[in-house]
Amino acid sequence: MTLLRTGAAIDASGEDRRPRANDPIVFPAQTISSMTSTICGPPLRRKWPLWWKLSLAAALPFVVVLAVAVGWLFYAGVGIWGIDWPVVWGFAIINYVWWIAIASGGTFISALFYLAEVEWRSALNRIAETITIFAAACAAIYPILHLGRPWLFYWLFPYPNVMGVWPQFRSPLLWDFAAILAYVISSILFWYFGLVPDLATMRDKADASQKRRFYGLLALGFRGSDSAWRYYTIGYGLLAAVMAPLVISVHSIVGLDFAGAATLGWHSTEFPPFFVFGALLSGFATVLLVAIPVRRLLRLEDFITGRHFDILGKLLLTSSLCVGYAYLMEAFTTFYGPDAAEKRLFINKITGELAPIYWATILFNVLAPQLMWRQSVRLNEALVVLISFFVIIGMWCERFVIVVMSLRRTHLPSAWGDYTPTIWDWLTLFGTVGLFIAGLLIAVRLLPTVSMFEMRETILRYARRNQ
Amino acid sequence: MNAIADAPIAPNGLAATFLSEEASLAALADLNAADVGDARLFSPLPPSLPPKRTRLPAVALVFGLFGAAAAFGLQSFANVVAYPLDIGARPPFSWPSFIPIAFEAGILSVVVATVVGAGALCGFTRYYDSVDEIRLLREATIDRWVIVVRAPNSETLARSRDILQRCGARAIEEAEL
Amino acid sequence: MNRLYAIEATPSLTGAVADERFIAGPRETHRVLLALASALLGAPPAEGPPWLDRIVADLKSHRGRSFIHLGPDHSPEAHALVCAMNESLGGRGAVYTLVDDPSHVSSDGALSLTALVADMRANRVSSLLIIDSNPVYAAPGVLNFAEALARVDFSLCLSATPNETTGASLWAAPMIHPWEGWSDARAFDGTASVMQPQALPLYQGVDPHQLLALLLGANAPKSLDLIRQTWRDQLGPPDAWTDALAKGVIANSASPVSNRPLSNAAARVQLPEPPKAGIVLLFRPDPYLLDGRYADNPWLQELPRPLTKMSWGNPLQISPRRAREMSLKDGDVIRVAIDGAHATAPIIIAPGQSDDCIVALLGFGRFHTGPVGQDVGVDFFKLTGRSCGAPDIQKTGAKEELASTHHHAMIFDEGGVYARKGALSQFLKDPEFIRRNDEPRPAFYEWKPEGPAAWGMSIDLSACIGCGACVVACQAENNIPVVGKAEVLREREMYWLRIDRYYDGPPESPRTSFQPVLCMHCEEAPCEPVCPVGATMHDSEGLNVMVYNRCVGTRFCSNNCPYKVRRFNYFDFAGEERRAIESRNPEVTVRARGVMEKCTFCLQRIAAARIIADRDGEKSAAVTTACEAACPTRAFTFGDLAAKGSEVAARRAGPLSYALLADQNTKPRVTYEARILNIDEAKGTQK
């Protein structure tokens, strides 16, 4: 039984496995055989450790809460939430954008950095893609939940019908629908495609016939023949090449959900790239937040090393600077432009009743990650977890500022309003968090957490370099 | 998979495991030079062989363009021909707003075409192949490079065995392929 | 152009619409009356407030064309004095005439309610008949009518609905609706009218005329015979009866103009002393519930009051300075006690109110009425009729949420950006001054709807008095649901048309502007391109139509509307209303949960007009929207812009016409005509 300890993790050789500045990309003690055993070990285990059972037991009630909240929502109507007039969008849209940004971040690491041919990616891309899958699932339920008549959501899909009507394609929400559909399907296919060789490994490593059958079915008969590998590599490269622009376009389109509106504070061309920066930041923070405990609990210290911490920390810092630039530009364009109502709204954002949320955004998204300039902070697991958590909270606050603060203070002062979230808003949010964590736990239980075939490449390349 | 027999009745192939990629590639080269039959390499990671020439990228591109064009065409058809509506006095053929959906449809088409195409080329869902009778093949997805030779006759079989042993094979197994 | 000066203690519609408004509490009004008397009637010199000199000068320079009107809450002596002033200004016959009021309240003290209650209390009344009245609730509190009623042996209350008096009487009988029986009425000038029944009584109600006749004798004639009997002399020839029924009035029944001269004593009358120093508690009938008779009417409970935008409650109105002195904010609960009676109510800050008075609205706090009005608000009747001593005010420290549709403090529209207005002098100098600073908006792409008609509307802000009749007419016509206090507190009221109230100037005495806001039916509607299912689109006649059946409820359209005229059915508001199905307008869809709705330019009336035009072979027929029909000052002008000589097209072309939020470039079909105030400067001075 291994419990999470924030101090030194002692392995069999008695060496301290805290992340260090001079860590290699993978520890030389690991061969491809030992790596395979280490990674295949947890899913093939018969009994699972207490930490896993406790975590799942803690997460499952939230899933139940989510089911209850959604059921009550469908029964009673969307009025159980705190949305009103003129703030007609609230937590549902905030949470949707928050989740999809987290999801997009995973794809950045697995697709974009594949094209950049970086060697640190192989230890993290499976975690990143799994985060994408479950975060995208959590995101995808919200656009249906927030509809006034959710049972008619399929009208957004262009299907031939007796009424002869089509969806209204100029709407940014419809672009969003297409983008999310494409993104979810592509992410699932990309994730599965990348899993196939590892599933083959699991099939061949497993002893129990039931497990062999399970993984064998999923492995689609992959054997690792040279022709299969070569076609596979071409296919994988194609997918990565296409997923990278996809993820940028998806998050730009999410930004257009707002930029395509005439609402004060939204109608700005900076929104698409601003949202992409936000996705980068959310993604790196979530990967760190998940990878650090997984690294300890599953004994992956030899694969996720100080180098990964260092690089991810720098990426977090970079994306934080990009997001800070976007905030600066928002302020600049507001005051450089002629619209008095925009200026009034911005001043209300920074000095009004909800100004603490705006400043929390600045603090958590821009200021807290600046600690990452110091390498000692980047290598300190506890601090990195804390900063990543702050970033996640800060990104949520940023969405709150965007959605609620702009809708509260509209063009006409007679139409100003307020927004008070209800208990159902909160329960739905925490329910999706529980769903996400439960999904990750189940994925960790069944699937290898590191991409083994890519890890083998990294190990062999590293061994060859240091011979 | 059926239970693997202890020894094949009429062996017409060999499987040999190697500990390193270099050794396996050298053995593969030797086998091909000696022209002993059909030799295939099974490895736990993509081998360092020259890439295959394939039309998969071009096919995927065609599918993508087709998907994008179809989506663009659908939007144009719906707004210009099928059911033109006055939506905020916007032009019926408001093509800039048709681009995002067309782009996403194109990407999705590429992804599906690639997964299906690459999957077909890789032999996905080919759950049984005669090489699955070889017990050593299991290590090919873990940490060994496995060469499987299908020798047409016993002379080539013996010659293959010599070459494999010379190249440093860890274990050799006979198989009926 | 007329110039209206308003002098009042508490904000009213008259004051909001006046060209210049001055605040005067009861003591100040007394000074004003004395000063006016001295200036106009040669009374002993009296010093009035400084702003009065200008008014007096205006009155004098327009002899024969000026008039002073005094409100009803003043003593008879004050009214006599004002009559004398009007006579001295020479308005009789030119500006006003006097008629014999046929139904004046008797000055015989023995016939007053106070005398009756004294008799009841002294057991001198054995039978009491109360017809269509609610004295247990609405009689002055000092009389304690309920206790006196308990001493009457036989009491019968005839009332259409159960109320406080029916609950306290020995017998209660249901009264028919006025439209279910024969009756008569007199207008203010004495013109008589006969009221015909529109339907036989739906439920077995009692006709009040019938009841009285029954009590007077066994062979009670029918109401119809009673009416004919009453008016036999005025009617004359027999066919005059049918004539009177057809026309609605009895010909030549108006009172003659009276030429009786005013007694000289009127000019020398002594005004009663004003209340001493301190705060005065003023009582006013609620603008919509009046004396409480409409407390069970949900439309009137929810309709936002014109100035405070309050619904479902009657907070005490306090001036900004007084609230600051007492450290009170909107919603703070205070306890008011006067002469032994007390009431606990929240306060609301009323800009423009005199510091010397607190205003309590009557008609709330009903304790025996239907489910809608029961216990809504606070009953202030029990404080009425008492001596004018200063009330004792104590803060309770509690706080109550006020269901006001202008939720956050006063909205200032400095410079009139939204509800534009200007001075007459500005207008005369430069008629286009309203639009002078509007930038022309170039069009990227022009596409006009093709339809034969092009519907548009022009709202005259000089005419709008903010009464709210249009709002409730729209609610009645379009089956707009009432949402109740809890949902109004959550800002989910469903009005398609709202009246925005803006303040301009210092909070103590601001200028008030009203602006009805409804769907602008923008030609380049920002709400239309963002609906993912195309549930909102334009029709060929320029209407932005909302397709309820197609709406899935993403609410993006509401985000994109800069005027925020769209309303969303968060719950099944229409389904939750307890009302008879027949009470809805059958020509308008009742919206389900999860669907967006907004003003449709009364599309059902446009469709009906098309049918009439087809039937008559005309190109188009006139259409009157519900709001246009209900507006007492004809502030709305709706019509076909494409029709020749249409009034709305002429108004839109006028120099005062402007679009709200023109910089959004939505090209709205609803435009406004700026308000012109008959003042000399751009900002009227108020002291």
Image (cartoon, rainbow, N blue to C red):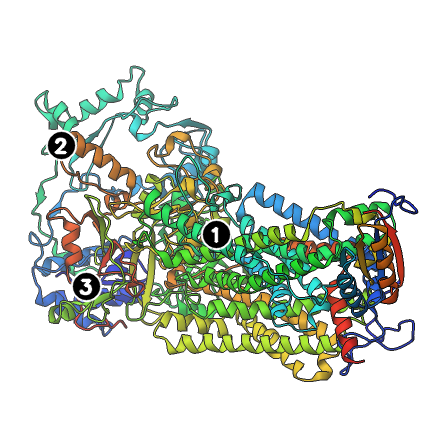
Between discs 2 and 3, the one toward the N terminus: 2
Chain letter of mark 3 equals C
Q: Is mark 1 on a helix, strand or loop?
A: helix
**Mark 2 or mark 3, whichever is nearer to me:** 2
Of C402 and C67, the residue lying toward us: C402
Q: Name the residue under label 1.
A: B67
Q: Which amino acid does label 3 sit on?
A: Ile
The amino acid on which the numbered mark 1 sits, given as a three-letter code, is: Gly
Q: Quadrant of the N terminus of chain C?
A: bottom left
Can the viewer see residue A393 in this picture? no
Q: Distance between the residues labelled 2 and 1?
A: 53 Å
Q: How many marks?
A: 3
Measured along the vertical axis of the image, is residue A207 above or below residue C137? below
Q: Where is mark 3, residue-wise?
A: C676
Q: Where is residue B76 in the image (x, y as percent from the top left)?
A: 37, 50
The secondary element bearing badge 2 is classed as loop
Residue at mark 2 shares a chain with residue at mark 3: yes
Q: Judging from the image, what secondary structure is the residue with disc 3 in?
A: strand
Taking the image as shown, residue C11 lies to the left or right of residue C449, namely right
Q: How far apart are marks 3 and 1 (CA)?
A: 61 Å
Q: Looking at the rendered structure, which numbered label has been put on residue C509?
A: none
- The amino acid marked with disc number 2 is Gly
User: In terms of depth relative to the viewer, which is nearer, C402 or A311?
Assistant: A311
Determine which of the numbered discs, if any, sits on residue C617 in the image: 2
Of all residues shown, which one is farthest toward the front?
B155
The image quadrant that residue A164 belongs to is top left
